Image (cartoon, rainbow, N blue to C red):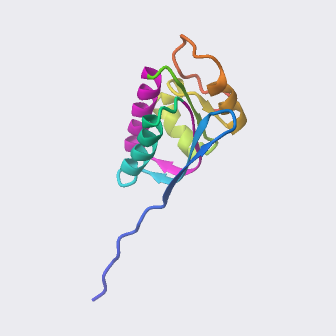
């Protein structure tokens, strides 16, 4: 008889603060049902400290499901309530495709490079709704 040990999904999140005061959450691995609570906690802790200029770097994310998208939407809602700005960095075609399929590419500001995301969140808050997949993303 052999036993199958559960596969532990790869997930990491690391917070960074840029000299500009922008806060980066660098996320790697998979965001889904089993890892989304940790992702939500990382994002919530960042917001609880009053950080309102946030770049979510999903460059190292290999997979995201609807649970992960829900965490992102909750984060965006909270940032908007705090009159802040949030941008996503992502160039992975698989992850970008999910944003397109769900039409969330029109809700989030998505950039292929950190520099463009930094410029976006450093700008003055606008009355415009978020979205539009700037910077050459989908």
Please tell me which residue lies in front, 43 or 128. Answer: 43
- Which residue is located at x 36 percent, y 48 percent? 37
Please tell me which residue lies in front, 124 or 114. Answer: 124
Residue at far top of view: 127
Residue at far left of view: 1
Seen in the image, is 2 located left or right of residue 102?
left
Seen in the picture, residue 39 relative to 54 is either above or below; the reply is below
What quarter of the picture does the C terminus occupy?
A: top right
As for residue 59 lying within the magenta part, the answer is yes
Residue 17: name its quadrant. top right
How far across and how far down the image is residue 21, in percent? 63, 33
Seen in the image, is 63 located left or right of residue 138?
left
Seen in the image, is 17 located left or right of residue 29?
right
Residue 129 visible here: yes
Please tell me which residue lies in front, 42 or 111. Answer: 42
Please tell me which residue lies in front, 113 or 86. Answer: 86
Seen in the picture, residue 14 relative to 133 is either above or below; the reply is below
How far across and how far down the image is residue 92, in percent? 61, 45
Residue at far right of view: 115
How far across and how far down the image is residue 12, in percent? 51, 56
As for residue 31 lying within the magenta part, the answer is no
What quarter of the picture does the N terminus occupy?
A: bottom left
- Which residue is located at x 33 percent, y 77 percent? 4
Image label count: 0
Identify the magenta region: 53-81
How far across and how far down the image is residue 14, in percent? 55, 51
Residue 113 visible here: no
């Amino acid at each position: 008889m052999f036993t199958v040990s559960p596969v532990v999904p790869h997930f990491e999140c690391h917070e960074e603060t840029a000299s500009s005061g922008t806060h980066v959450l660098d996320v790697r691995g998979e965001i889904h049902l089993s890892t989304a609570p940790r992702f939500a906690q990382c994002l919530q802790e960042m917001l609880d400290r009053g950080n309102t200029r946030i770049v979510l770097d999903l460059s190292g994310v290999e997979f995201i499901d609807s649970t992960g998208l829900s965490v992102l939407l909750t984060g965006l809602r909270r940032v908007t309530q705090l009159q802040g700005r949030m941008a996503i960095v992502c160039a992975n075609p698989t992850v970008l495709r999910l944003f397109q399929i769900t039409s969330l590419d029109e809700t989030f500001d998505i950039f292929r490079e950190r520099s463009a995301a930094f410029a976006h969140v450093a700008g003055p808050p606008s009355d415009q709704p978020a979205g539009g997949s700037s910077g050459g993303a989908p």
